[in-house]
Image (cartoon, rainbow, N blue to C red):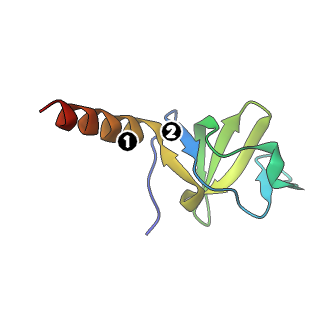
Amino acid sequence: MSKEFAIGSKVRVVALPPYVKTAEPMPMLRPPDVIYIGEEGIVLDRRPGGYWGIRFTRGAFLLDSQYIESVETALDAQESENSNEKL
């Protein structure tokens, strides 16, 4: 099952695909080094086939949900770990 993200939410790259597609009307394949692990982007839209259009600093690309995670979810998990450590 693929993850769901809200349009406009921030996501983080957790793994690099073998290539990335540009999010243009006529998508082009690009090498994976146009993005990097840990880079954050903003979700633009949902595309067929489980792809998400995401705006990064070097352009907008289509990524499958297995390569990204929500920044808010990661921050919430980190905050809960920190609060457990304080107890």
Circle 2 sits in a helix, a strand or a loop, which is it? loop
Closest to the observer, 68 or 25? 68
Closest to the observer, 68 or 43? 68
Question: Pointer 1: what residue?
Answer: 73
Residue at x 24% of width, y 37% of height: 80
Circle 1 sits in a helix, a strand or a loop, which is it? helix
Residue 7's disc number: 2
Closest to the observer, 10 or 14? 14
Q: Quadrant of the N terminus?
A: bottom left
> What x and y, as percent, mark residue 73?
37, 41
Q: How dense is the environment of label 2, judged by Cα within 10 Å: few (below 14), some, or many (20 and up)?
A: some
Residue at x 57% of width, y 63% of height: 50
Q: Are marks 2 and 1 in contact (CB under 8 Å)?
A: no
The amino acid beneath tag 1 is: Thr
Residue at x 75% of width, y 43% of height: 35
Determine the CA span between mark 2 and mark 1.
Answer: 15 Å
Q: How dense is the environment of label 1, judged by Cα within 10 Å: few (below 14), some, or many (20 and up)?
A: few
Residue at x 32% of width, y 36% of height: 76
* Chain-order first, disc 2 or disc 1: 2
Residue 15's disc number: none
Q: Quadrant of residue 86?
A: top left
Please state the total of marks drawn on the protein image: 2
Q: Quadrant of the C terminus?
A: top left
> What x and y, as percent, mark residue 4?
44, 53
